[in-house]
Amino acid sequence: MTLDDFLAQKPLFYDAIDYERFPKAYREIVHLLPELKIIHLVGTNGKGSTGRFLATALHRSGKKVGHYTSPHILRFNERIWMDGSDISDEALEAAHQKLLGWIPLQMAEALSYFEYTTLLAMVVYEECEYVVCEAGLGGEFDATAAFDKVLSIFTPIDFDHAAFLGGSIESIATTKLRSMQSVALLGKQKHPEVETIARSIAEEKGCKLLRVSDILTPNIEEQALHLATKNGLSNYLRDNLTLAMVAYTLLGYEATENLFDQNALFGRLSRIAPNITLDVGHNALAANSIAQAYFGKKVTLVYNTYGDKEYREILTLLKPIVDSVEIIDVDEARIVERSLLESVLQELDIPYRSFEEINTNQEYLVFGSFSVAETFLKRMNVTSTMV
């Protein structure tokens, strides 16, 4: 069975997760894989761009490196990047067939979409020295947490996925931070209690915990500012770049501008046309960062959202920069009912209508989730994220 057919049988979302299933499957193949240096990225926002900054720098320095990220926008291959490019269809299929030969078919079929993809990535990366591995929705119980790690990196932690992680910042942070192992790097945080919890867990686990401010040097800070200005990065993307540069030095290397002179991962405030910016953010922390990046400006917001997101808070945060909202129809069961979204827009006194086409005289921000980004790009007949 081809990879496309195999994955098509698996639902993308689950109401409950079997936390023993993936570690058991991983134990089936771990002896067949070389010892990989895995850098684990956990957090609410910034994992993708931080990981790509770091993975690209490691690649440019001569290391064979993979970057595992999720979800994808247009093509599944986006999830498995290696040595500067997304994996090819042929290499993906070869890895899939190899993996099916390593684990029992019944076990492979029982794995979730994300769990199987995670194992598949490890097969693709079997010849890599470093793997920058992004967690899915969680931390401690995430499939990616089963791997031994040389470094855990924690990007900003905020409210998200309450159904799985809990409704308080304490429960969310605890679940994410308990994925740390031997050495952990804590990025800039919005909530002070995140650092308190991190210190407690690090002490319990005997993990060496460092804050980005503990390692940040004036030289790195100056380089990050220069690169952010040169590449048009917003403040939050500059923070992610800085975190990646600090992580690089923590691995024992010297962070230099030529290694980190790059744009962010596609979909992170990506300028896809002279008057269109696209961002895959979908929570309040992302909305707040967007609002800061656009402070003093006004945009037409192309938007939709999943029903379980705090879209009232998100739209409240974005209101100062929004002239009007254009609701884009997204064909997915998790999308909020149109009437509920319209009710919130009316309460917030934000003008809205349905998205139909781009007006060249307006400035657009496409925001709301990976599904919103995918739908918009397909409406615009964009077939690749290499824009």
Image (cartoon, rainbow, N blue to C red):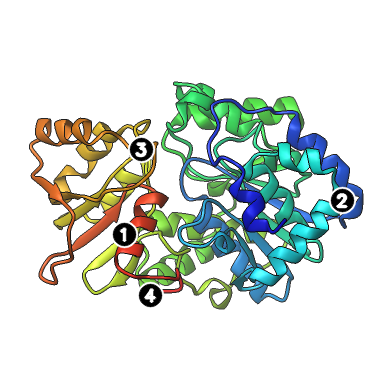
At mark 4, the secondary structure is: helix
Residue 121: % across, % down: 70, 56
Q: Which residue is mark 1?
A: 376
Name the N-terminal-most of marks 2 and 1. Answer: 2
Callout 4–callout 3 Cβ contact below 8 Å: no
Taking 326 as reference, is 308 above or below it? Answer: above
Mark 1–mark 4 distance (CA, rounded to whole Å): 28 Å
The nearer-to-camera label among 2 and 3 is 2
* Residue shown at the point (70%, 28%) measured from the top left: 19
Could you say which disc has been placed on residue 230 in the image?
A: 4
Mark 2–mark 1 distance (CA, rounded to whole Å): 39 Å
At mark 3, the secondary structure is: loop
Q: Which residue is mark 3?
A: 306
Quadrant of the snapshot with the N terminus: bottom right
Mark 4 residue type:
Lys
* Residue shown at the point (66%, 72%) measured from the top left: 83
Q: Which residue is mark 2?
A: 102
